[in-house]
Amino acid sequence: WEHFGSLIIHSLALCLRLLHASARRVYEATGYGPVFEEQPVDTIYPEESPEAKITMSCRARANPPATYKWMLDNVEIDLNTQSSHYDLVGGNLVISSPIKTKHVGQYFCLATNIYGTVASREASVQFGYLDLFSSEERESVYVKEGQGAVLLCAPPPHYPDELSFRWILNEFPTFIPLDKRRFVSQITGNLYISKVDSSDSGNYSCIASSQSISKSVFSNYIPLVPLAERPIRKYPADLKVKFPDTTALVGQNLTLECFALGNPVPEIRWKKLEGKLPSNHEVRMAGANLHLYNVQFEDAGRYQCEAVNSKGKDYHAFLGFRSPWVEHISSTEKDLGRDYTMSCTASGKPQPRIRWLKNGQPSHRKEMRFSSLTFDDSGMYQCIAESHHGLLYANAELRVYACAPTFEHNPVKRVLAPKNGRVVIDCRPKAAPKPSFSWSKDTELLHNSTRLSIWEDGSLEILNLTRADEGRYTCFAENDRGKANSTGSLLVTDSTKITLAPSNADVKVGEDTTMQCAASHDPSLDITFIWSLDDRVIDLHEESRHYERTLVRQHSNGELLIKNLHLKHAGRYTCTAQTPIDNVTASAHLVVRGPPGAPGGVRVVKKADKNVTLQWSRGADNHNPISKYTIQYRDSFSQDVWKNATTSPPDVEGNTEMATVVELFPWTEYEFRVIATSSLGKGEPSSPSPRDKTLEAFPMVAPSDVGGGGGTSRELTITWTPVQPQYYSGPDFGYIVAFKPQDESQWMRVTVADPQAKRYVHKDSSIPPMTQYHVKVKAFNRKGEGPFSLTATIYSAQDAPSEAPGRVDGKALSATDAIVWWQPLSQSNVDGYQVKYWKNKEDSEGGAQRVVVPGSENHTRLEGMKPDSHYLVEVRGYNSAGYGPASEHLQIHTKRPRKTPRESCSYFTLTRLIVKQRLLESSHILCIMCVSSQVLLRQQGHSTATLYATHEQHIDLPLHTDGNYVVEVRAHSEGGDGAVAQINITSNSRIHRLLLTSSWGTLPSVTKASTAPPP
């Protein structure tokens, strides 16, 4: 039975192999292994997602169609388990009701048909979340105006790491605008304010948003309290946002962040230390972001940002890259028994590791090298390049086959070849294993000779062709599976020859020239002319501004017109006359003379405090002698402006490569460039030299506008205009202030260390007021002291007034105004008077209102007072030294308020129109007697009006014509003018007189009387 069982198993295996081979034959003509069209991608599933489902895509093109299975962390997923959360839809894997502890991991799918199995790329499944911010209260941030501030976002726990950040001020959706002064880091979320001012006061909240899970959370408010400081100090730039060393992937977009605090607001500038910033860069966010699109290998290097008012440190981005394929596998068919090597190479930083899969299974071979292919070597192969950046896949099918030779798809062709030339007739049958070859011409069997060769791949080569070589040629191919042959023909034509070759030319920039070319050829063939410059074919369409074929009638003429020549058009021009079977060439050189090229290697070789010696390399003279050089410079204070330098000697001759630049500022950073000039014009400037700083020196410039005076009693105030930074000449810059009374010889000296200082106040209780002093100021630095400024004469501060104004008096003018007057002070040092007034017993003296009056006046009007109130008033003199003593308090009682119409209503009877007005009554006033009234009568649509005045409580107004009238009434009392009350009246033929009455404190009324018109 054991023997019988083994026979059954052997027979079964044989049947399966035969069935498999039969299936392969059915699909052999059109079949192929799986090729992925969709593969799984990294997926983040929000923990709070309402859709409890994850779909991982997998679809492969295959014939016959592929079957699929899925792997999780290299373990096959069992789709048949009843408790499984998995379903297979086509090739896609659907995970229902995902569970974090079960379904997080690395997934990939396997697609299989009769030709083999391929594995998809690996993709991760992770659960995304974004917690709430901590509920703890945020501490207030107190910052002096002019200083910088950093508000910390401190985002809550989250996944994935990528968040976007914004800040709101006081309430949503008032977002903080981002500019040169404010920046939000998209790495930390922190808000940076380079210089705080009073407008920044408020409550700030950080918003963290996750695009992956579509969720945003808000932090508690952070109060920012600017502290007033006068004067506002200036601070050097301080880089607070610095980008780390960064590794990027080829093709990735990359953003580098850099931001500085400081006053004035620093300007951020970017550069690449190894050269220019790449063309794919963009500076965003007012300079704080450098964005690189689609980064490439050549973008790697050291990048630096700096702030204009103080240079920051270098922080470099060393860019590494995902491994791109240098050489990768592709599907192929190979003969049975042949040697074959699958090559797969990737480059990257670091160098990736290569591993192989065959039909989805790992292969331990480092290289797929086959010494003699068998049918078992057929299958689906995958090459995987792996580094810490990720995985890169290349897939291919290897199909090993055997067949008798056949020319069905590639017969021997009819060939044309030139006389005296060379021809190769291809013989490329499909055959496996490789066949042996032989050739015949007509009925003659051919053999290798000095003029005729049969190559290893079956091709036939014939040299030095003659007309006798024309005829029918047959290739015979034979292997162990069979044999076949195919016949083609050879036709020998006249060869192509250059009859007019181009000649050398010498021209200047901007001129035109012509390059000639003509050829003879077989009349049965078409000819075309191709021009190239230094082996680069000229595209006459794309470069039509400079190149044009001239219009000539001869078909065999290829003349080329070159227009508006530039230096780049110089070189070796080659004319190629080409027919379908041969070509000939002829060349000539074109010399273009023009302005010199840019010098190279400009550098400082020697430097002092006010001069440097430069050296450079001579640039191309472009076939015209260089006559002179011009040297230009720019300094750190004028980055965008190049200026012509003063040199020694003044004229830099064209045969030198060194010069000295003079009249520079000490301790200043410079860049230099050199421009060459010839008789044909000025050339392009060289690249700037590396930045270099001149040596330190004594300050050469003294402060200007020295003066002063004034101030508080017993003080001497000295002022000046600060020296500009380009004149500091060295570090540790400051000022020495010297002063002395006019009648003394000994100078007193003080040191002011602040380079931006513009005043010094000397306090001494022994200084007499209004004393004449001589003052002068000079600058100093670490190297020494500079020259003094011109001596100025100033006066010490005067004493404050010592007397109080006398005979202060005044009176109320209305309910809100009063007038005050006093006897002027007899002292000559009074600049003016301050009048202070406040409500007695209700307001504190600290909240009093103040009026300042020039010293030439002795009275003023007080406004904005409250009606029917008692006020206290005081007057004191002042000057630059301060205020003198106050006068005795004056009491003023403001008048009672006027009556104010509050609301009105009207009604009609048959004979009267009554307009009533209620009067505003305060708690302590029931009635105010009217002193007088003004009544304005105007007909609607007319600009002129009639004004009436009365001391009575009524007035009789004539209405001369029919129409609509407007009556305005304003009362006047001791409290001032009242508001305007307005009445609209319609007059007709029966009404010609208006009687306006008012019972003050009760109801005013208007009566329209039906009387005859007035005489």
Image (cartoon, rainbow, N blue to C red):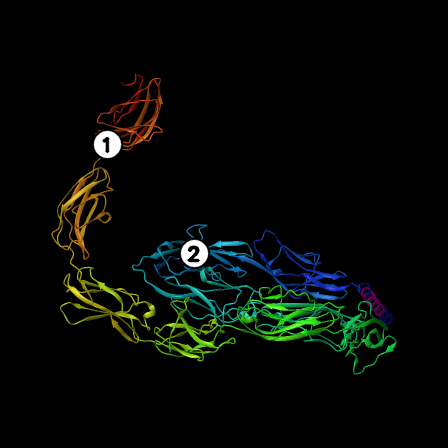
Q: Which residue is mark 1?
A: 972
Apparent side of residue 847 relative to residue 286 in the rendered image (left or right): left
* Residue type beneath disc 2: Glu
Apparent side of residue 211 relative to residue 520 in the rendered image (left or right): left
* Residue 293, image quadrant: bottom right
Q: Nearer the viewer, residue 148 or 170?
A: 148
Dominant secondary structure (helix, strand or loop) of the stretch shown in magenta: helix
Q: Residue drawn at (36%, 78%), measured in percent from left and top?
A: 608
Q: Residue drawn at (80%, 82%), measured in percent from left and top?
A: 449
What span is in magenta? 9-24
Q: Which circle, 1 or 2, is nearer the viewer? A: 1
Q: CA distance from mark 1 to mark 2?
A: 64 Å
Residue 650 lies in magenta, yes or no? no
Looking at the rendered image, the quarter that the N terminus falls into is bottom right
Looking at the rendered image, the quarter that the C terminus falls into is top left
* Residue type beneath disc 1: His
Q: Residue furthest bottom?
A: 450
Where residue 301 appears, x then y in whole percent?
A: 51, 71
What SS does tag 2 mark? loop
Q: Nearer the viewer, residue 234 or 995?
A: 995
Where residue 317 appears, x then y in whole percent?
A: 50, 69
332 shown above or below 822: below
Q: Which residue is mark 2?
A: 136
Q: Residue furthest front?
A: 553
